[in-house]
Image (cartoon, helix red, strand yellow):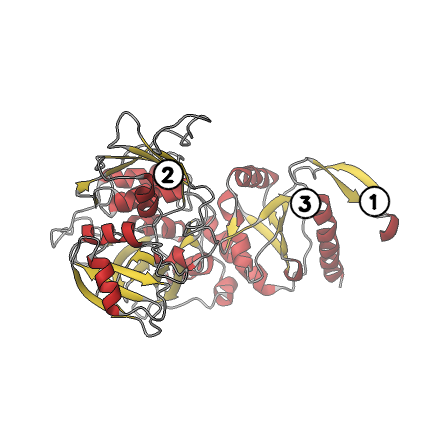
Amino acid sequence: MDGISDVAVGVKRGSDELSMYNSPNSGMSSISDGTSNGSDSKKLRVEEAPPSRVLHIRKLPNEASETEVIALGLPFGKVTNILTLKGKNQAFLEMGTEEAAITMVNYYTTVTPHVRNVPVFIQYSNHKELKTDAGNQRTQAVLQAVSAVQSGGSPSSDVQEALAAASSPVLRIIIDNMFYPVTLDVLQQIFSKFGTVMKIITFTKNNQFQALLQFSDPVNAQQAKLALDGQNIYNSCCTLRIDFSKLVNLNVKYNNDKSRDYTRPELPAGDGQPSIDPTVAAAFSKDSNSLLGKIPGALNPLSAAAAAAAAAGRVALAGQAGSSGVLLVSNLNEEMVTPQSLFTLFGVYGDVQRVKILYNKKDSALIQMSDANQAQLAMSHLNGQKMYGKIIRVTLSKHQTVALPRDGLDDQGLTKDYANSPLHRFKKPGSKNFQNIFPPSATLHLSNIPQDVTEEDLRLLFSNTGGTVKAFKFFQDRKMALIQMSTVEEATQALIDLHNYNMGGNQHLRVSFSKSTI
């Protein structure tokens, strides 16, 4: 029975610790004395809990699983116990050593940890160890399986039973919400933490990027599925959905950027597909700041995103994927370009904060996005596209912000501040817009169409932007439609001119690039 009372202590401590950390940045905070009754509780000043190998995790989403909480600790060392307080959205995680816990806390003070896209808070607990009910076999099985993966061994036979080890070493992986390119090398790097990856085949099915990945041993496949299913490769996107495949062996014919047999390096590239560029591979291996290097779903993997985009052939891999959210755009058509047109086009890939067309070089502009991920995304999609008849170049700027003109100085309207614009597409966390980010395409997706607007009205409106409408299709409810222009450049121009166009009755048309064709 004493195990159960210990769990109760854990719950009690959880509520104490909550009051203790109301202001985590102050280093000092109030906590109720604990000896007084609740109504006139004296306040004591206490320092933050000293380092301990037990960590207190708060603000977990309701549906968070033990595996996801354990995954937060995995990169830093062995996880030896876990106690989740479901009703309080909290958990206690016990690391194998105090050093591992200190490394973990230090790391997460610089990079906010996320579970299911929700930021969570981690601090030292007053407990020095967790005494939980050893009867909780499922938790123990999860812990043992995970620690076996960590130490590079295989789990004991009872754990294998607990895991109901699957007979297939092949996983089928679907990537949801993919608005960074995910490459075969990214998958190899993530999954090889769980065992030897022998073969990978990637393909697109039903407009979704999918992969089949074969381990040398079914147990490794089971462990990888347990730890990674539902995790994000990059912050808030590229979610892994993992199942076992009915196949037990993959037949790979070519080694290129779509398929790879790591056991047979001599295979041809085939079909004129490029083999993976060594600079891209090197960029991945150097990137210590992403899931890729460390943890499922918690990080901000800029250089990985740069390498992924480079592997997708969208952007030259410059060794400067820093943390700037500012882009330098050059080779603009200076007769035509305005801050508003740049705001609209770059706003497809992120929330533009400021735009400055350079006074002495009006074919160039600085664009400040709301973060470095968005800058990366805009660069990978817009570099090399045509705008007002000219192929634009987009690179990361060394500037950290775009300066506004000093008060009273007129810079001829070349600098605009959009920080409070109502037109930002991504200000709502978890907005559907995150899932609908596509490269520039000849087909546009229209939404917010008033009920009385006809196909003819829209065809006329879009042909007035200087292009030719090739095809049009209303969705069933007629509030949305697809419209296809004859070129990507024409569609880009139409988006710049007509996104947020007032259709009457204060209904503003919304225009995005589409992945569909009509």
**Whole-percent x and y of residue 78?**
54, 47
**Whole-percent x and y of residue 329?**
28, 36
Question: Seen from this angle, which residue lies furthest front?
Answer: 504
Q: Quadrant of the N terminus?
A: bottom right
In this view of the protein, which residue sits in the foreground, 1 or 271?
271
Which comes sooner in the sequence, label 2 or label 3? 3
Disc 2 or disc 1, which is closer to the eye?
Answer: 1
Do labels 2 and 1 touch, CB within 8 Å?
no
Residue 41 appears left or right of 276: right
Q: Quadrant of the C terminus?
A: bottom left
Q: CA distance from mark 1 to mark 3?
A: 17 Å
The residue at 47%/44% (across/down) is 420
Residue 483 appears left or right of 5: left
In this view of the protein, which residue sits in the foreground, 240 or 237?
237
Do labels 2 and 3 touch, CB within 8 Å?
no
The residue at 52%/37% (across/down) is 110
In this view of the protein, which residue sits in the foreground, 354 or 85?
354
Which comes sooner in the sequence, label 1 or label 3? 1
Secondary structure of the residue carrying numbered label 1: loop
Q: Amino acid at mark 2?
A: Asp
Q: Amino acid at mark 1?
A: Asp
Q: CA distance from mark 2 to mark 1?
A: 47 Å
Is 240 above or below relative to 74?
below
Q: Which mark is residue 33?
A: 1
Q: Which mark is residue 125?
A: 3
In this view of the protein, which residue sits in the foreground, 290 or 340?
340
Characterize the local packing of mark 2: few (<14), some (14-19) or many (20 or more) Cα atoms within 10 angstroms: some
**Whole-percent x and y of residue 404?**
42, 30
Q: Amino acid at mark 3?
A: Ser
Q: Locate residue 340: give its quadrant.
A: top left
Q: CA distance from mark 2 to mark 3?
A: 31 Å
Residue underneath mark 2 = 287
